[in-house]
Amino acid sequence: MTKKILVLGTLDTKGAEIAFLKRSIELSGCRATVMDVGILGQPATQADITREDVARAAGQTLEQIRALPNRKRIIGAMIQGAIEKAKLLHGSSGFDGVVGIGGGTGMHICTAIMRSLPMGLPKLMVSSMASMDVSEFVGAKDITMMTSVADLASLNTVTRTVLAQAAGAICGMAGASVPSSEPRTAIAMTSFGITTQCADNVGRCLREMGHELVVFHTVGSGGMAMEELLDQGLFVGVLDLTTHEFIDQVAGGHYGGVGDERLETAGRKGIPQVVGPGGLDCVAIFAPEGVPAKFAGRRTYYHDFRVCVRSTAAELEVVARILADKLNEAAGPVKFLVPLRGWSSASRHCEPLFDPEADRAFVDALKGSLKPDIEIREIDAHIDDMEYAQAAVSHLHQMMTSSSR
Amino acid sequence: MARAIVVIGTLDTKGEEVEYLSQRIEARGQRTVVVDVGILDKPLTPADITREAVAKRGGYSLEEIVALGDRREAVRVMTLGASRIVEELHLAGQVGGAVALGGGTGTHIGTGVLRTLPLGVPKLMVSTVASRDMSEAIGTKDIAMLHSVIDMVGLNAVSKKILDNAAGAIVGMVEGEVGLKATRPLIGVTSFGFCTAGAMHVRSCLESHGYEMVAFHANGTGGMAMEDLVEQGLLAGVIDFATHEFADHLHNGYCGNIGPGRLESAGRKGIPQVIVPGGLDCIVLEFNSPETMPARFKGRKVFWYDFRSGVRTSAEELLILAQTIAGKLNKATGPVKVVIPMKGWSEADGVDGPLYEPETNQVFIDELGTLLRQDIPIIKVDAHINDPAFAEAAVSALDALMSKAKRSTAP
């Protein structure tokens, strides 16, 4: 069957480039549907979904949007309309990939539309601004960013090369095989550098049980990516054993940039979850010039270009309350599993961040704040020990089987 | 031998993923060459070019690197060794495209290798860290970055889908390639939002003179990308229409991330260039309200744009800019002209624009006149940068230099 590609761009400034991209896509044997998200001047080529259609989907006419007081609101309205149109199209006749081209503003508009589409659907953004900080634009989504090198302001030897490759890339991605529709048995798990052994152990236990493990790197965007995929219904259970992002958020560490929804999606969807304190023993900081003054006097563990400093009892009590507030809202089953012999490879007995008293303060605070039907299990093992992984997997398994009954 | 797709990764930690990716590429009818850049544990899967071979081209034996115990040095050596090998394969005409996959370190090595391939050779990096600042990793090269979203620890439904997409993308890029062949002389032109209209006029003038325009978004990397293509010998001449990056560079503005080589390659290669002060009237910064405006710019005139705004450059700043630009142009070995639009340097600096200040602009023009070499003329055009008349003047200035250059090199 012919694959369908949605092409996004502003047809006033990038009309010729989009027409060329569309032709290249069709030469590759796919069908292209062009959506015009521009508002300046006149479109230079024909759109399949016009700017008027986009405006209407935002509940306004194009004239009304043009009359908005500033550029930011005008763009916001076009994004809103374009997301509506893209979702509608995806839900009805569907498409197999989406590609956008643009400069700064075009990238802002097109990636917003791509981020509203589900994971796995091929997404390609060709931009003259791709070689800089793209965290806002890519977010937690599987968007491929392609640098156009030259500005997409005219068709020439360089831009034709880039656009032909973009057409090849998106058609190639759209034609990629879809994983077989085996029953969904995937489990999501969080992990980071100093809890990697735990992820390996869990993977081994789960394989024996016929489950597939998908690991998320808890560096801010990773935790949020897991929340999004949980929302997409991709997982039947969660092992959120590395909640490290929360201590970074509370104590000002490097990976604290999580959204409000972190640790809430599984609960909202009623998916069974086992939660653990992995990495809450340390605040991760980038410290090329030495440990900042506010952490002076704390015990430290040197990872590579990053340093971990020990979290305090007071900080952990705050984290305990945040976690409890979130988990108390869960509509599905939850258990909290605490490894008593350390929460990362930096806090084993004899390692610099070993501090059972601070750990205890966290557990006590958690007990005081979690609602009574959420069980806290204390396991006499280190987080990297097979025993802890086995306990986590078997508790999850129990909850999954009893909740499916 | 048919051209192959080079697959780069650390086969100790990402062996399974590299093997799967390579299989998916071959299933689509392309040959692969797997390069192992790992040094930690034993490779999990076989390589076509082993880590031993890579280390050797980097100047060490594998044992020596492992014994060194210096992670940073090991990464440097493996990147260098793999880059040399891939470059040699490319020069032998054996590379159709290249794809790398990895996490933090893998992305560092992978993009390091990909950057050695010239513009136009398809390059894809599948990375767990692609959703952040990629300026160092991508540099000025046409590397496509695929954000893997999940960590590459084992094959599963999600990682397989991502790797399938990656295989499709690189094969599609290789098969979709049209080749980089210029039919008319290429002229590099820098431009940015505030003088886009002018750049569009420049384009039609250039085309009517028989040239093809390649525009570069003067956003920091864009200007540097143009320098790179001048070095590659792809451009016959340059109209540096938006030198705005230098103004932003003074205050770490939005487009200010340029390297020390900006505005120097054309001069070093001796190709004709026309320089225009497009956008030197303003410094573009990320703020969109009086409240979020950085304190040190308070009191300056502002051009409200979107999430970015332009603040007026001062006379003192323009003096510094004139010195910087004159210093660079005075080193040029080829012909140079400076062409100045006397009625304003950007959309914000028009007669009715919020940053219009001809007397401040004059400070720049005077200083430049004092500092520039005698043989570099300053042509003043009584027009705004976005007027067709100005584009006409800039293009004819370049055209005169081009024809002169051609006559002098003709036998």
Image (cartoon, coloured by chain):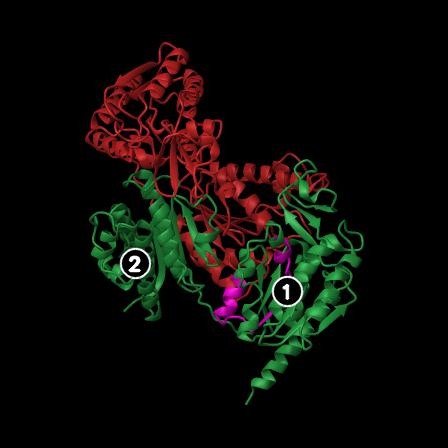
Q: Position of residue A394 (x, y in %)?
A: 24, 22
Check disc 2 and report the residue beneath it: B29
Left or right relative to A2: residue B63: left
The reply to whether the magenta stretch includes residue A364 is no
Please state, as top left, top right, bottom left or bottom right, where the N terminus of chain B lies in the image.
Answer: bottom left
Q: Position of residue A280 (x, y in %)?
A: 37, 27
Residue A244 in the image: above or below residue B114: above
Callout 1 crowding tier (Cα within 10 Å): few <14, some 14–19, many ≥20: many
Do the residues under discs 2 and 1 have CB atoms within 8 angstroms?
no
Query: Residue at the spot x=39%, y=24% of the render?
Result: A266
Mark sitting earlier along the chain (2/1): 2
Question: Distance between the Cα atoms at labels 2 and 1?
Answer: 51 Å
The reply to whether the magenta stretch includes residue B231 is yes
Left or right relative to B357: residue B78: left
The amino acid at mark 1 is Ile
Whether residue B203 appears in this view of the structure is no
Q: Quadrant of residue A317?
A: top left
Q: Which residues are magenta?
A: B225-248
Q: Chain of mark 1?
A: B
User: In the figure, what tint was chain B given?
Assistant: green
Q: Position of residue A192 (x, y in %)?
A: 34, 35
Residue A43 in the image: above or below residue B304: below
Count of numbered marks = 2
Check disc 1 and report the residue beneath it: B325
Q: Position of residue B232 (x, y in %)?
A: 47, 69
Which of the numbered marks, if any, corresponds to residue A18? none
Callout 2 crowding tier (Cα within 10 Å): few <14, some 14–19, many ≥20: few
Q: Which chain is red?
A: A
